[in-house]
Image (cartoon, helix red, strand yellow):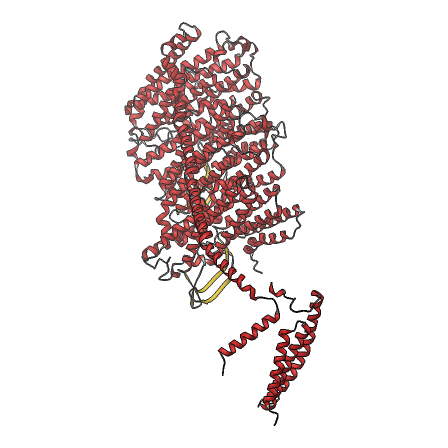
Amino acid sequence: MEVGLNHFLFISAALFSAGIYAIVSRKNAIMVLMGVELILNAANINFVAFSRYGNFGLDGQIYGLFVIILAAAEAAIALAIVLNLYKTFANINVDEIDNLKE
Amino acid sequence: MVNIPYLSLITFLPVLGMILLLFIPKNKPEAVKILSLLVTVIQLIIAAFLTMNFDYSAGGVFEQSSFQFLEKFRWIQLTGISWLGNLKIDYFLGVDGISMPMVLLTAIVSLIATISSWTIAKHIKGYFAMLLLLNTGMMGVFVSLDMFLFYIFWELMLLPMYFLIGIWGGPRKEYAAIKFFIYTLFGSVFILIVMIGLYFSVQETIGNTKVFTFNILEMMNQSNYTADGILSPLNPYNLRFAAYIALFVGFAIKIPMFPFHTWLPDAHVEAPTPISVILAGVLLKMGTYGILRISFPIFPEITIQLSWYIALFGMINILYGAFCALAQKDFKKLIAYSSVSHMGYVLLGMASLSSAGITGAIFQMFNHGTITSMLFLIVGVIYDRAHTRGLDDFGGLASQMPVYTGFVTVAFFAAIGLPGMSGFISEALVFIGAFSNDTTRITAIISTLGILFGAGYMLWALQRIFFGKLNEKWSSLTDLTAREYIMLIPLSIIIIFLGIYPSAMLGMMNTSVNSLVNFITETSNIITAGL
Amino acid sequence: MNESLLINITLAVLFLPLIGFTFTVLSGGKIKKAFTFEVFISSITLILSVFLLYAKISAFVEKDILFSFSWINFGILPKWGELNIKLGIKLDNITVIMAFVVTLISFLVHIFSVEYMKGDKRYNRYFAYLGIFTFSMLGIVFTDNILGMYIFWELVGLSSYLLIGFWFEKKSASDAGKKAFIVNRIGDIGMFAGILILFFTYHTFNFNEIFEQMSAGKIPFNSDFWMTLTGILIFMGAIGKSAQFPLHVWLPDAMEGPTPVSALIHAATMVAAGVYLSVRIFVMLTADTMLVIAIIGAITSFIAATIALTQNDIKKVLAYSTVSQLGYMIMAVGVGAYAFAFFHLVTHAFFKACLFLGSGSVIHSMHHEQDIQNMGGLRKKMPLTYISFLVSTLAISGVPFTSGFLSKDGILAGTLAFGKLTGHWLIPIAAFTVALMTAFYMFRLVILTFHGEPRDVHKFEHAHESPKLMVIPLIVLSLLSLFIFYTPNPVSPDQGWFLSEWIKTPSQVVPENSRFDFLINSAGEQTNHGKIIHSVEYTETLHSVHYPALFLSLILGGLGILIAFVIYQWKKINPDAITAKIKPLYLFSLNKWYIDELYDKTFIAGTLLVSRLSAWFDTNLVDGIVNGSAYVIKSFSNIVGWFDKYIIDGFVNFTAFLSGFLGIGLRRLQTGKVQTYIILVIVSAIILFVFFRPF
């Protein structure tokens, strides 16, 4: 059996679902962040896979690179936010930080 | 030579002064006063300069080229607004023989009022800021030749006046201020309506295109009217008659003409002295000036048609004002009603539509400005000292304050129209003019009774306040201070000088008045022939 | 001697008193002796006007000297033509004589006042006022046009006002001043209206120019009625100023002023201005106007004489006698006795000034006692005052060898001729009755004041002859009351230089059909060097009535004097018995015919009523409408406000409430937890995907 586009998509979907689950279910903000990373990487896999099997040239790969860079930047900022959250609330449990409610 | 915009300068100098004034810290009231004084002095200097460089032979009135110190720029221009067409408003200033005396009067009265304001103690900064703004409004009305601009200045002067009466006034100041404001605003609405009606009836030719315009001079030119304009004489269903009445009412409120005069006594009684001076000295003239500048030349045929009624109202003003004055017990109210009476002469003179009458009317406007200013200052002097204005509270002041009494006598006899003082000349000219016109002759003859009743209430007031035994209560009153001398002496000199040598002022208006009279007759003929 | 010199001197005479006034009034408070300047000016003015009189009479007796300048020049006016208001001077014989009279009496009054007013706290101001009076009066005299006349007319009114109310601490004085000014104004309105008509018709104020156009046939509105009306209107000015009925009421009250002022203004000069005006406009009077003038003069002189019979205030008697004599002059103008009107003006000015100054001298020495019932016997204490007073009284009573005899006789003859020619006999009858009464009340005054025994012994003992400065003017004036200054023939003035050389009756200019017949010169003859305008018939009538008039006036004058002596000197008849018999008449006369009361009740009360009504109308009706409409609008806006608050705003508030209510329900969805939101997003995305799936 040759590895085809569908396999990649399948992995990507699994990874995306894992990411969603992490975001929705975890209480720790860091874990939520990691879920976001998973989703990003799921998207990356899609980009690269379509780049390989579709007729899009190298565009997909270049976007993949962009997303990696973006993810890095996002991680940095998000961690900074989490740090500030901790400073403010002494806690990074997202369930308890429900100020948006007001 | 660089064209210096003298008229803009004289108009907006006070606003400039007001802005500067706002930077003066609150704890330096003297600086505020001195700045205001400086502004008005410079204004007077400019006005004097303009007077000296005034060309007596230039007519003005309807002809742009013979206006002097002209300034004309496109101010607001919007093209292609769907239903408005092209909106065009000019910044258009100029003076002729009709407005020049008024500019001079405004400068003089403003200066006097500023000096008289020296004793104001409450919110000095705000007061002088308002005073300067008011000054700009007044000056602007007399120099603007674009109706939109005219209206802006007309309204501009309302607001500071409202605050000046409402904050610095007497016990019933709120009532008086609101009455004044609403009453005059009520009049302004009429002016606004007519102004818009005129706008949609008059098209000025610029290049090849025809544009609606607010230019007062273009409104006088009958060839500028559109065929279907609501106020166009070409339109068989035009509303010119109604518009004339509306405009006249708008101006009449300011004069104030019977029966629209009742705001005046209240406003005067409550206003502080300098504001009364400005009110009587300049503001009342804006009504009659508006009629001369706008109503007469734009609606000449209706002016002729209604001249008898204008004269009638002039007569009623003269006699009714005099009778009311006779019954007053408050010194200031008496002077206020005497103003009503004296403004009646202006109406009568204008209604005559003769050169002598209109010259007399304008001269009377100037003279009333100086004489009544003096009278209100006189009331102020006594009120500052005694804190009462009741005519019957006094008595025998002539022996306590002889110099003051001297000035009072000069002012009172000037108001009575004693020859040798300026009021006589203007009243005589008004009567000559009104008598020479068949329409107004009878009103002129009846109005001569005003001379009698004028003497009646003035002399009676003089007697009650100054003659008789001195009321011991007032034995501590002091005679005039140096500041009061500074205000009263120049006014007395003006009054007597113009009484002896009236040509100094009459020459200035002669050409303009003649061209106004000719213009009214000729244009009226054109319009009636066209119908 | 040339004309321009005369003009310059005239201007100097005119303006010097003004300079005196200005200086004195400005420095009066600081310089104690400021009045001396004014007195000095007055003497210079007198000298100059004497020179003027001499120069005019000697060099230009037949020629008028004119000078005018453009005061207000309007150029050509539309619908009017040229409008150039000129002021100017006209020097004719009347002018220079009048100027001399004014400056002389003014000077004498100045001198007199130096003593009389001594100690007054407004001493300098008094002299300043005298200065402005002299200036204004001379203005009236010199002016060549009717506008100038009106201007100075008002100015003398002002100075009269100031001087009557000089002692303004007294209510009666300030009342009198006010009354004088306002009553004069009534006449002035008429005069002003007349001036308007003249100016409208002739486009000039100048007397000569008006008369020229008039003689060319141009009259106002082309109608005789308007011509007559114009004359009457202008004459109204004279009615006011010369205190003619019905405006005579101010003059007796004017006696509240200092006595020298009464002499100068309210006896000799200013009140004669009305006569002067009538003389000036004589040529433009139509027959009807003249009749009106004659009747008013007759009524005035009669009323005033009857009132003078019973007055007890020395100044009031003189005041009414002045009114009466002014009536004489006015009457003389009305009956065409032009020259005698002016002649009487001059002679009256001197003797009446003398009488007033004499009364001032008496009052001064009696410590401001004015009631003649408290006087008597002063002859011994004040011989000089007495003699001068007596001479003047003789003059006013028309006793031969006095000036009054000459002028009064002329007027009486004139009225008699007028009666004979026109049939208006009441006028001469009134005139002769007045002559009788005048002689009576004047001698009553003299006898009660100077003869007999003192009735107030205390005051009498303190009485003394006045100081020299007061007596000299009296003597000068009483000398001028003698005939010799006017004519060499003590019984007929006709040969005198005054009438035959100096004063010529001018030819009338009104159209002949509206003149009296006797004023049309049918024969066209010229007598002497002047134009004589009367018809031959008139001249003859005048000759024929001259001697009857003379004898009649002598008899009546003598009778009046006799009665006065019988009653008051010899006390053959008790005056109280007579008054008791004719009590109503006596009271009528004593109370001045109740004219003041009548005016108080009608005109003054009427005016005040109208003024109060106007004020009431103004505050309650006119202002009521304003405030009422404000109230209506406010009420209306209250209703609108309620509607707005509860209906419109209620609707708005309801919407807000509804959304709030919904919000409260929905807010439960908002947990504030990011994860819940994400689930919501995902679920919604899926739902959307399912519903709107693109493939």
Residue B380 visible, this orientation: yes
- Could you say which quadrant of the image residue A24 lies in? bottom right
In this picture, residue B27 sits left or right of residue B437: right
Seen at 37% across and 47% down, the residue is B307
Q: Where's residue C408, x and y in %?
A: 39, 20
Query: Does residue C225 sit above or below B437 in this rendering?
Result: above
Nearest the viewer among B175 and B383 is B175
Residue in front for this viewpoint, C607 or B417: C607
Rendered location of residue C387, percent (x, y): 50, 13
Outermost residue, front direction?
Answer: A25
Total label count?
0
Percent coordinates x, y for residue B246 in the rendering: 40, 51
Q: Is residue C218 visible?
A: no
In this view, the residue in front, A23 or C584, is A23
Q: Residue at x 56, y 72 (%)?
A: C680
Tell me: residue B5, above or below residue C635.
Answer: below
Residue B17's place in the image compared with B224, above or below, is above
Looking at the picture, how far across and down is residue C315, in whole percent?
Answer: 47, 18
Image-based side of B250 in relation to A2, left or right: left
Q: In the rendered view, would you say C583 is above or below B15?
A: above
